[in-house]
Image: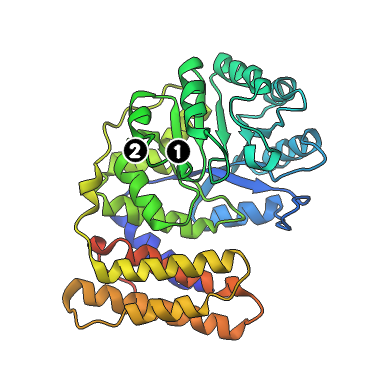
Amino acid sequence: MFAATLILPWLESLRREFPGVEIFDAHTHIGEHDPDGFRCDREELVAALAEIDARGVVFPMHEPDGYPPANDMVMREAAASEDRLFPFCCVDPESDPAAEAERCLDAGARGVKLHPRAEGFTLDHPGLQGVFALANERRVPVLTHAGRGIPALGRHAVDACERYPEMHLILAHAGISDLGWIAEDAAKLDNLFFDTAWWNVADHLQLYATIPPGRILYASDMPYGPGIFAAFCFLRVSRAVGLGPEALRAIAGGQLARIVAGDDPADLGPPPGVDAVGRRVIETERVVSYCSVSLQLAFRGFDPSESISLARLACQTRRDGTVGELLHYADRLLSIAQENGQAHPEIPYAMMPATLLAMVIAGTPEVGAPPIAV
């Protein structure tokens, strides 16, 4: 109810400013055996994509017993999705990955997914060279997890892109493991991409400000990340750094459609640069910092209520104008988070949807408060 009553009107207001934006999600999952307990089937995923009129790339969740059956399941489910889903296969470098990738690509898979953290490998693993060579030969994308806990991932990714120039390598989760230094390489390599499947607004701002827009691909990480939130975050941060309609259409899905089809990616020019983020607004930065702490706590099953209370206190200000209006708006969202927490004290994550929205809005003060009442 929260998403339907609040985010959808915001999305529509932003979409009216940027007509022609069609969403093609680069990062979604289905499966039922992941040790983390998450489950998602085709019907659930398709319904979530349809809510924002999107289609998406889909691949299996983590499969401790091996990927071939899960890859077959994903391809069957994608075939039954009426062109809403585009299957990628997952491979483990210890289990003849090139042969499995070739089998799946021959059967209709459109790309390959790697999860070096789940399977405990690095991108320079000898078993991946055959996968990269196959992707280079067929000009198909390879998407790899690029969150924390993967040594030298960025350096190995750059090396792979240089060695296999026809392979399109996508670093998931905004490439946060190496985002601080990799922008110069990304500008030189037209086959290195970053998906937006992440939650921290500061990371999004650095991604959109420093990585060329033609190298950024919209993504949600469903079911782990709500697609409707990912769409709102993408549109708001894009507006905050001043990207134009052509860049938005490419990030939203146009560039991914080219990559999945094996076409050359479009060149959309350089990134806007860090100055595009605008001046610092210390009051809103305090709200972002406390929201970030609360999100980290909730993601790990701890009570985030104290940090949310501090975020609300940070919203209290004598400022008027745009900043005062925005802080008042964030405070109202955080009060909804507290109400949700009181209604569901056994579920720390219940407070997170409204907190995520408050963080993104506070982190993009130059865009102002949304035109939809809370």
Please name the amino acid that badge 2 sits on.
Answer: Ile
Any mark on residue 194, and which?
A: 1
The residue shown at (50%, 15%) is: 163
Please name the amino acid that badge 1 sits on.
Answer: Phe
- Label 2, label 1: how far apart the Cα atoms are: 8 Å
Residue found at the far front of this picture: 151
Residue 318 pos. (x, y %): 20, 83
Q: Is residue 224 left or right of residue 232?
A: right
- Location of mark 2 (residue): 211
Residue 247 pos. (x, y %): 31, 40
Any mark on residue 95, and which?
A: none
Residue 257 pos. (x, y %): 48, 33
Numbered label tally: 2
Res 72 seen here: yes
Secondary structure at numbered mark 1: strand
Res 20 seen here: no
Q: Is residue 302 above or below residue 49?
A: below
